[in-house]
């Protein structure tokens, strides 16, 4: 955990007694602010984004279509931390990246899902354990598992995938030209039962963004909150919090009404990702200076009681009776308990 982030949590002045110890979701964020730019000149169009769970202060990103099968390690404010080349797999149209459980570990997932003409016979997902960054000016070669998939109805153009933190399933959202966007799910078990035939995705109900703006359904990036209770989706023009509905097996089966939210508004910003706590939301863009932005949590909801707590920003005049050490312990307890809810081993 980054020390400056930990210190910022302490100065947030959130009462220890009010902090949900388990199953907490940030339901409202402060406006995102730019925190850096990518240092590497080889990152020209940051299209996918994931915040590392294994390495403090590391984010992963990859370029839009046109690059080779590689991705990049970066510091949270943009410092170059190395290049990871895949020894297998191709990069027809990489559009999205996610992070989530795989067996007893945490993996990076890359979605080769772009299809502007909606004509691909299959799309491909790549999965690998988080590598260890080797530093600026270095590169390494790693292998990834591959999983081919097909839509159950017709080919779609997509730029958005997420991995369910509760089940390890992959969620895919189409880039729609209407207010509604189609959604699909791939079970985590598909990685263990791979065959020569592509996996057929499960069609879910559409996500209704409830707006007459044609750009509303053009989803360019999604991620699921670490608590698993809702999805954050971003389009070219806005962000949306979308509560998730699950069945008895904890599989995502549908969506509640979307709530409009802020999204970092730079030049063609497409990617979004939660950090491991769910208290930070990160954005990257395909702008010429490749900005990196972060939004901190404003309102946290206890998912068991429904109670909400507003987190004040720095300078709130903390009550000296609040123990920073106890605060940190409670936060770490929440993270530990969440971390114990792993998806069942599928490979």
Image (cartoon, rainbow, N blue to C red):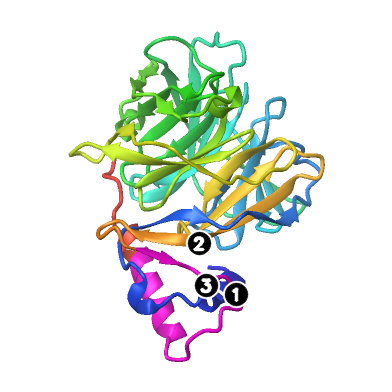
Question: Where 204 sits versus 347, above or below?
Answer: above
> First in sequence: mark 1 or mark 2?
2
Viewer-closest of 252 and 186: 252
Magenta run includes residue 221: no
Q: CA distance from mark 2 to mark 3?
A: 12 Å
Question: Where 69 sits versus 75, above or below?
Answer: above
Q: Secondary structure at mark 1?
A: loop
- Range covered by the magenta-colored residues: 308-335
Q: Quadrant of residue 55?
A: bottom right
Mark 1, residue position: 314
If the image is split into quadrants, where does the C terminus sit? Answer: top left
Q: CA distance from mark 1 to mark 2?
A: 12 Å
Query: How far across and how far down the image is residue 104, in percent?
Result: 34, 50
| Cβ atoms at labels 1 and 3 below 8 Å apart | no
Looking at the image, which residue sits at the far front?
Answer: 212
| Cβ atoms at labels 1 and 2 below 8 Å apart | no
> First in sequence: mark 2 or mark 3?
3
Looking at the image, which residue sits at the far left?
Answer: 248
Can residue 347 be spotted in the picture?
Answer: no
Viewer-closest of 341 and 206: 206
Residue beneath the point at 51% across and 35% down: 144
Q: Residues within 10 Å of mark 3 (few under 14, many from 20)?
A: many
Query: How far across and how far down the image is residue 320, in percent?
Result: 47, 91
Nearer to us of marks 1 and 3 is 1
Q: Quadrant of residue 115?
A: top right
Mark 2, residue position: 298
Mark 3, residue position: 9
Q: Secondary structure at mark 3?
A: helix
């Amino acid at each position: 955990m980054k020390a400056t982030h930990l210190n910022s949590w302490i100065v947030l002045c959130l009462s220890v007694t009010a902090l949900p110890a388990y199953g907490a979701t940030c339901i409202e964020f402060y406006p995102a602010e730019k925190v850096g730019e990518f240092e590497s000149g080889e990152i020209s169009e940051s299209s996918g984004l994931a915040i590392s769970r294994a390495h403090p202060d590391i984010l992963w990103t990859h370029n839009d279509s046109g690059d080779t099968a590689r991705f990049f390690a970066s510091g949270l404010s943009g410092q170059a931390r190395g290049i990871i080349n895949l020894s297998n797999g191709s990069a027809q149209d990489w559009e999205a990246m996610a992070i989530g459980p795989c067996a007893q570990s945490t993996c990076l997932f890359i979605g080769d899902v772009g299809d502007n003409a909606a004509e691909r016979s299959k799309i491909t997902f790549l999965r690998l354990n988080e590598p260890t960054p080797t530093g600026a000016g270095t590169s390494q070669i790693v292998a990834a598992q591959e999983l081919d998939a097909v839509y159950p109805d017709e080919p779609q153009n997509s730029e958005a995938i997420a991995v369910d933190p509760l089940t390890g399933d992959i969620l895919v959202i189409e880039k729609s030209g209407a207010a509604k966007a189609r959604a699909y799910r791939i079970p985590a078990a598909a990685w263990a039962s791979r065959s020569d035939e592509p996996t057929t995705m499960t069609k879910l109900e559409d996500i209704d963004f409830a707006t007459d703006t044609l750009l509303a359904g053009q989803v360019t990036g999604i991620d699921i909150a670490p608590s698993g209770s809702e999805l954050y989706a971003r389009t070219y023009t806005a962000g949306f919090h979308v509560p998730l509905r699950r069945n008895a097996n904890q599989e995502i089966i549908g969506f509640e009404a979307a709530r409009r939210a802020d999204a970092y508004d730079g030049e063609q910003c497409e990617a979004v990702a939660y950090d491991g706590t769910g208290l930070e939301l990160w954005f990257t863009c395909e702008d010429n200076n490749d900005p990196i932005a972060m939004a901190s949590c404003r309102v946290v909801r206890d998912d068991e009681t429904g109670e909400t707590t507003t987190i004040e920003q720095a300078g709130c005049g903390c009550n000296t009776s609040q123990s920073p050490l106890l605060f940190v312990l409670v936060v770490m307890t929440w993270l530990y308990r969440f971390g114990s809810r792993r998806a069942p081993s599928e490979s």
